[in-house]
Image (tube, rainbow, N blue to C red):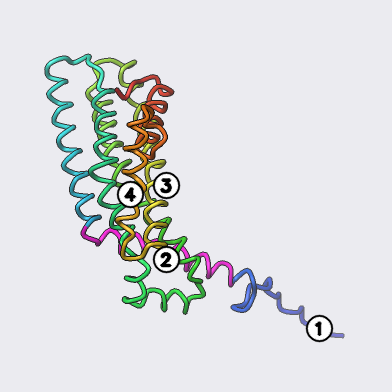
């Protein structure tokens, strides 16, 4: 009597296009694409290009000063130089990018068909606003943290001793954290200003930054403003790393 053939092995069931897991994966992929597109569009804005150029200029300027200090005194600490570079980047590089992010990005996306494309991929308008906010945070963090990382690496290479090199390395990590905090703070506020105020988003963002800063400075405690709070965080992060940003 012949033995019946073994049944063919069946593959494990996979997710079909209509499965919830597949839909969630597709939505996550679409959201990542929306954030990447938001970063690219913001990077192409005039203000963001200015901010990137200022980041390069500041990096080169402070890098040259670090080399000069190394020639004069090989064992000198570059903590103060790095702290000054962080403050300059937070103003001159992050500022123009934040103003670009505050300039009614939703209207530009509607005009260029980005909102329609996002809706076709299942991304709601609220999720698209979130993607714009995240893109603004990432771009601002990029123009602050990356130059600081390069300057910190240069400071480590120029250190005249191992303890000083380790201190500069720890300070570099603290400065990278400062760049991330600057991106979250300024990028979130800029994106919210553009969403709420539309074409007047830049004016609203500037007012939210400068008016409390001026009032807090008159009151004798600038920490009650965003620039003062960021400066206080920079000093705290530098002290925690064993250095000084002064």
Q: Which residue is mark 3?
A: 184
- Residue 134 point in image, percent of width and height: 43, 55
Label 4, residues with CA under 10 Å away: few <14, some 14-19, many ≥20: few
Quickly name the residue at label 1: 4
Q: Quadrant of the N terminus?
A: bottom right
Cβ–Cβ below 8 Å for labels 2 and 1?
Answer: no
Name the residue that disc number 2 marks. Answer: 33
Q: Which mark is residue 123?
A: none
Mark earlier in primary sequence (2, 4): 2
**Horizontal side, residue 16 vs residue 225: left or right:** right
Q: CA distance from mark 4 to mark 3?
A: 18 Å
Q: Earlier in the sequence, mark 4 or mark 1?
A: 1
Of residues 90 and 58, the one drawn nearer to the viewer in this rendering = 90
The residue drawn where x is 24% and y is 30% is: 154
Q: CA distance from mark 3 to mark 2?
A: 20 Å
The location of residue 150, given as percent across then percent down, is 26, 37
């Amino acid at each position: 009597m012949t033995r019946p053939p073994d049944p063919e092995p069946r593959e494990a069931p996979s997710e079909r296009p209509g499965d919830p897991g597949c839909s969630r994966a597709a939505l996550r992929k679409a959201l990542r694409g929306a954030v990447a597109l938001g970063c690219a569009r913001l990077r192409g804005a005039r203000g963001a290009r200015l901010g990137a150029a200022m980041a390069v200029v500041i990096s080169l300027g402070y890098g040259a000063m670090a080399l000069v200090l190394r020639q004069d005194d090989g064992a000198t600490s570059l903590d103060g130089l790095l702290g000054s570079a962080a403050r300059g980047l937070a103003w001159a590089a992050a500022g123009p990018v934040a103003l670009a992010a505050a300039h009614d990005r939703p209207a530009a996306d509607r005009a260029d068909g980005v909102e329609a494309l996002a809706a076709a991929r299942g991304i709601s308008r609220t999720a698209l606003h979130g993607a714009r906010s995240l893109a603004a945070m990432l771009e601002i963090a990029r123009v602050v943290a990356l130059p600081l990382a390069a300057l910190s690496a240069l400071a480590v290479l120029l250190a005249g001793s191992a303890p000083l090199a380790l201190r500069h390395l720890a300070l570099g990590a603290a400065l990278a954290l400062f760049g991330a905090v600057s991106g979250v703070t300024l990028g979130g506020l800029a994106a919210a200003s553009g969403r709420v105020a539309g074409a007047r988003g830049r004016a609203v963002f500037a007012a939210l930054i400068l008016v409390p800063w001026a009032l807090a400075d008159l009151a004798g405690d600038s920490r009650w403003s965003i620039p003062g709070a960021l400066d206080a965080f920079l000093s705290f992060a530098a002290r925690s790393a064993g250095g000084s940003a002064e």
